[in-house]
Image (tube, rainbow, N blue to C red):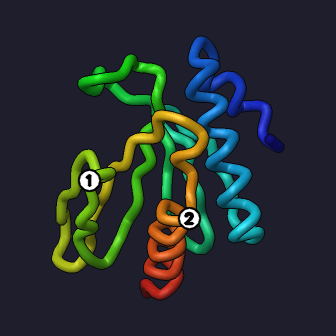
Amino acid sequence: MKNPDILFFFDGFPRALALYQALEDAVLAAFPDTEVRVQKTQVSFYCCRMFACASLPRKKMEGCGRDYLLVTLGLPERLDSPRVMLSTEPYPGRWTTHIPLLEPGDVDRELLGWIRGAYEFSSAKR
């Protein structure tokens, strides 16, 4: 973890911090040109534009406590998976997709494939 502000962001949420660390490690390994920015409500991943972010949930998800991580991706199409918590189309051809991470193993090949899709979609936008 390169940015000390991340520790402040996750203060009081040690389990979410561990989930974030697994996510950040995987994202930076796959996309070394990624810039990580800590903001008020989320930690964002940028190439030329934001392609993913991680945030603490605002409300409890059924079946788990508040100490999970919510990953949000910008994708060109709706993602049809039981792992998706919510998917909306704020603009035609742009889907905002929210995926909860409950354990470090959730940062898997499938999630990284979706992150790659968001990275490529963000890079191709003008």
Q: Do the residues labelled 2 and 1 touch (CB within 8 Å)?
A: no
Left or right of residue 91: residue 9 = right
Q: Quadrant of residue 17?
A: top right
Q: Which amino acid does label 2 sit on?
A: Arg
Q: Mark 2 points at which residue?
A: 109
| Numbered disc 1: secondary structure | loop
- Pinpoint residue 81: horizontal percent, then vertical percent: 27, 60
- Pinpoint residue 9: horizontal percent, then vertical percent: 61, 26
Which of the two residues, 71 or 89, is positioned nearer the viewer here?
71
Residue at the location (57% across, 51% down)? 107
Of the residues under marks 2 and 1, which one precedes in the sequence?
Answer: 1
Q: Residue furthest right?
A: 2
| Numbered disc 2: secondary structure | helix
The label shown at residue 69 is none
Q: In which quarter of the image is residue 76?
A: bottom left
Task: Note whether 8 is above or below 84 in the view shown.
Answer: above
From the image, which quarter does the N terminus lie in? top right
Q: Name the residue under label 1.
A: 82
Q: Residues within 10 Å of mark 1 (few under 14, many from 20)?
A: few
- Pinpoint residue 72: horizontal percent, then vertical percent: 40, 52
From the image, which quarter does the C terminus lie in? bottom left
Gap in Å between the C-alphas at discs 2 and 1? 16 Å
Q: Which amino acid does label 1 sit on?
A: Pro
- Pinpoint residue 42: horizontal percent, then vertical percent: 50, 39
Left or right of residue 72: residue 54 = right
Residue at the location (47% across, 21% down)? 67
Q: Residues within 10 Å of mark 2 (few under 14, many from 20)?
A: few
Task: Note whether 46 is above or below 40 in the view shown.
Answer: below
Residue at the location (50% across, 44% down)? 54
Residue at the location (51% across, 81% down)? 120
